[in-house]
């Protein structure tokens, strides 16, 4: 767990004016990493978001800023794999050089470009993708649609449930998502093939693995914090009609692997330090986590106070409107450290650049569903929109935007930037 230090000081201001705006996602206290290129440029660069600008780290390195040489490369994984102490050192270097009054200002000003001129890619080569099911309110509500009397499966409070996803269709925010075709059944007996009629989003948090573990060597939960690098927002696009038909008995396949969108900026574990809090308390009667999933420090500070939102813009709207808001701190039954410890508990080796999805993060109240499946009770109750339209599931041209931010007393608000995608019509 990171302690707070001068890089978190809410009074610290940058010589980059837009980083001091009250509503920016990227003040100097955040410093998230991403990968970008300029229009017409083939080579990727790594960068840090600051206000409405990007600091080109390759250019900063050439200009003499003493950041780790891996940041002059083109794949963030080379940096993510390093000892967390080097991540901390780099954060201190960047923070000091970007602080108001720094002698680096004139040099680094030449290494900035507006975010509007940067095409963002995935931050690194993603080698493995696993999607968990830690959102207990989502698990309960989605389960209720299928098992009204017993919505949570008996294993839920014992084991952090997950399945292996697919990396090739993970896309950066802004990439359009084509409505998939698939096989489904309207009567549970006969099958048809065609464009999904029940296309949905899922509001999730993505965890990037930093240092991996050797095959056969589990990561003890007390060390799991050293193995995750940072967080992004993740939209696990889902075709509910395909999912319902194909998922028995092996789980999701084509209903989920046609697209997964992530926000482009990786908010580091250290940037999140001011927003750590106790892991969600277990209700009376809930089983205690088994010893390999329990750590006193994780119970005390394994939670993250992160507000999550879904926004929707239909083709008739001029701007997106907010559909819901939830909080990671009370939506997730399992912590990030528990996800890492469980994933490796059988000796499975996580690798740098692996992405772990948390599962849909719905809040406890009605209206806090993290997907349309929940907000519309499986399509039975259409969701009214402010302009008189309604939605059961996504329609062509709909634009879904996930947003996330952390705020709290004594800390500067930091955000994740948008995770956005527009639905294209199915291929005819
Ligand atoms: Ca999911």
Image: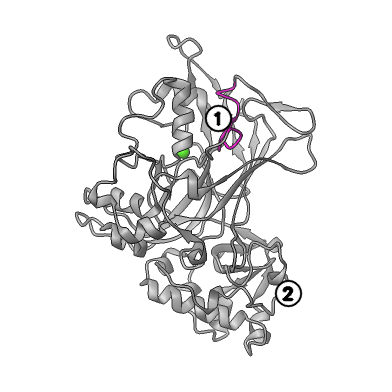
Its colouring scheme is one colour
Nearest the viewer among 276 and 400 is: 276
Residue 257 visible, this angle? no
Tell which tag, 2 or 1, sits nearer the viewer.
Answer: 1
Q: CA distance from mark 2 to mark 1?
A: 41 Å
Residue 38 visible, this angle? yes
Q: Which quarter of the image is occupied by the C terminus? A: top right
- Asked if residue 374 is among those painted magenta in the image, a careful observer would answer yes
Residue 176 is situated, as x and y percent measured from the top left of the image, at 62, 42
Give the SS element for disc 1: helix
Give the SS element for disc 2: helix
Q: Is residue 102 above or below residue 263?
A: below
Q: Which quarter of the image is occupied by the N terminus? A: bottom left
Nearest the viewer among 55 and 230 is: 230
Residue 301 is situated, as x and y percent measured from the top left of the image, at 41, 60
- Sequence-first tag of 2 and 1: 2
- The residue indicated by pointer 2 is 17
Residue 219 is situated, as x and y percent measured from the top left of the image, at 26, 58
Left or right of 161, for residue 196: right
Chief secondary structure of the magenta span?
loop
Q: Which residue shows up at 67% across the image and 83% down it?
A: 100
Q: Which residue shows up at 45% across the image and 22% down it?
A: 244
Q: Which residue shows up at 77% across the image and 34% down it?
A: 386
Q: Is residue 24 above or below residue 179?
A: below
Quarter of image, res 351: bottom left
- The residue indicated by pointer 1 is 374
- Asked if residue 342 is among those painted magenta in the image, a careful observer would answer no
Residue 64 is situated, as x and y percent measured from the top left of the image, at 54, 86
Is the residue under label 1 in contact with that under label 2 (CB below 8 Å)?
A: no
Quarter of image, res 125: bottom left
Left or right of 233, for residue 140: left
Point out the stretch of residues depicted in magenta. Answer: 366-379
């Amino acid at each position: 767990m990171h302690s707070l230090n001068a890089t978190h000081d809410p009074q610290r201001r940058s010589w980059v004016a837009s980083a001091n705006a009250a509503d920016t996602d990227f003040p100097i206290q955040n410093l998230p990493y991403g990968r970008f290129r300029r229009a017409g440029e083939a080579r990727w660069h790594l960068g840090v978001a600051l206000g409405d600008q990007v600091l080109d780290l390759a250019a900063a390195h050439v200009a003499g800023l003493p950041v780790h040489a891996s940041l002059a490369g083109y794949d963030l994984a080379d940096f993510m794999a390093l000892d967390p102490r080097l991540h901390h050192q780099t954060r201190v270097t960047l923070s000091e050089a970007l602080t108001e009054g720094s002698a680096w200002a004139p040099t680094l000003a030449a290494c900035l470009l507006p975010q509007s001129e940067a095409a963002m890619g995935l931050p690194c080569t993603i080698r493995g993708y696993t999607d968990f099911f830690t959102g207990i309110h989502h698990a309960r509500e989605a389960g209720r649609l299928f098992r009204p009397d017993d919505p949570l499966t008996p294993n839920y409070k014992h084991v952090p449930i997950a399945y292996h996803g697919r990396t090739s269709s993970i896309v950066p925010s802004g990439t359009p998502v084509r409505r998939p075709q698939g096989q489904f059944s309207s009567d549970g007996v006969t099958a048809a093939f065609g464009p999904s009629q029940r296309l949905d989003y899922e509001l999730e948090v993505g965890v990037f693995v930093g240092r991996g573990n050797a095959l056969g060597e589990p990561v003890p939960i007390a060390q799991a914090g050293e193995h995750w690098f940072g967080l992004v927002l993740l939209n696990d696009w889902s075709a509910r009609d395909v999912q319902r038909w194909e998922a028995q008995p092996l789980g999701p396949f084509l209903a989920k692997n046609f697209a997964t969108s992530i926000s482009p900026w990786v908010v580091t574990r250290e940037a999140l330090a001011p927003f750590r809090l106790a892991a969600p308390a277990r209700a009376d009667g809930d089983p205690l986590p088994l010893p390999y999933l329990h750590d006193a420090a994780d119970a005390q500070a394994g939670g993250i106070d992160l507000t999550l939102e879904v926004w929707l813009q239909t083709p008739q709207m001029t701007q997106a409107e907010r559909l819901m808001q939830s909080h990671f701190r009370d939506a997730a039954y399992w912590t990030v450290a528990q996800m890492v410890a469980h994933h490796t508990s059988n000796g499975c080796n996580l690798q740098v650049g692996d992405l772990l999805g948390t599962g849909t993060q719905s809040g406890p109240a009605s209206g806090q569903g993290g997907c349309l499946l929940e907000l519309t009770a499986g399509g039975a109750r259409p969701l009214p929109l402010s302009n008189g339209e309604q939605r059961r599931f996504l329609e062509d041209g709909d634009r879904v935007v996930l947003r996330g931010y952390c705020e709290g007393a004594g800390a500067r608000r930091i955000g994740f930037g948008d995770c956005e995608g527009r639905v294209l019509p199915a291929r005819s």
